[in-house]
Amino acid sequence: MVERDALSVTREAYDAAASTYAQLFRGSLPDSPLDRAMLGVFAEAVRASGNRQVADLGCGPGYVTAHLDELGLAAFGVDVSPTMIGLARSAYPGLRFDECSMTALNIADGVLGGVLSRWSIIHTPPREVAAILAEFHRVLAPGGHLLIGFSASESPSHPTQVYDHTVAPAYRWWPDHLAAMLRGSGLAEVARMVREPEPTDRRQFQEVHLLARKARQEQ
């Protein structure tokens, strides 16, 4: 059971790294203007839909969930790591955080105006990602938006590439390949942002944000 093994490895690895991860990244958004801009575009699109319910999937210690709340969204966080969820609840007691896997979300069909997935699919074996995208589609309301972030692979000849992530095994994706998978799941790309790495970045990978929308009426 490859997916289950990968899920267990990811959960245990993030449980072990949770405190260090929170210290490193909790204050990172002020230094990331492009990330904030893309989150702002996402928030504006969700607010315009009239449904402000948003799930931050793979929320970690909850700092992005809190940022979405500050942007006027009814945001809650979901993570597979119970230690991460504990840190998020402690840091942001006024927000909701649930322990759950993205492969089987405890969320009703069609209730969310938005889904945020920032680097939360990267630890999933590529052949299992389609099932997660189907879950994103399932929980989104018609017209709802998904913002998904990931690191790009090197070229179209490498739709996915394994890389040495600090916490757990991880995968990069060619943006057009993942966009095509989104279309196959009923989520049409609206926009994308590609950030080139800084010379001082430890990993010289492009960072990609894809904004996609579920159709207002299924065909």
Image (spheres, grey):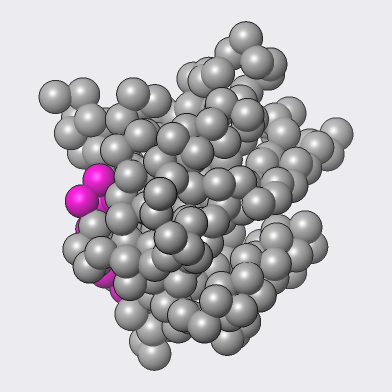
In the rendered structure, the answer to whether residue 170 lies left or right of residue 72 reads left
Residue in view at x 65 percent, y 51 percent: 190
**How many discs appear?**
0
Q: Residue furthest front?
A: 219
Q: Classify residue 123 by image quadrant.
A: top left
Outermost residue, top side: 157
Quarter of the N terminus within the rendering: top left
Residue 212, given in percent of the width and then of the height, sits at 57, 52
Q: Nearer the viewer, residue 66 or 184?
A: 184
* Res. 69 visible in picture: no
Q: What residue appears at the point 23 percent right and 30 percent down from the top-left corner?
A: 3
Q: Is residue 162 visible?
A: yes
Q: Position of residue 35 (x, y in %)?
A: 70, 58
In the image: residue 6, left or right of residue 74 = left
Residue 75: x and y in percent read 44, 77
Q: Quadrant of residue 81?
A: bottom left
Q: Residue furthest bottom?
A: 94
Determine whether 74 is above or below 165 in the image: below
- Judged left or right of residue 45, residue 113 is left
Residue nearest the observer in this picture, 135 or 37: 135
Magenta includes 52? Answer: no
In the image, residue 119 above or below residue 111: above
What residue do we see at 33% from left, 44% from top?
A: 134
Q: Report the residue at 39% width, 25% height from top.
A: 126
98 drawn magenta:
yes
x then y, percent, for residue 63: 52, 70
Q: Quadrant of residue 70?
A: bottom right
Taking depth in this image into account, of 95 and 130 the one nearest to the observer is 130
The residue stretch that appears in magenta:
97-104
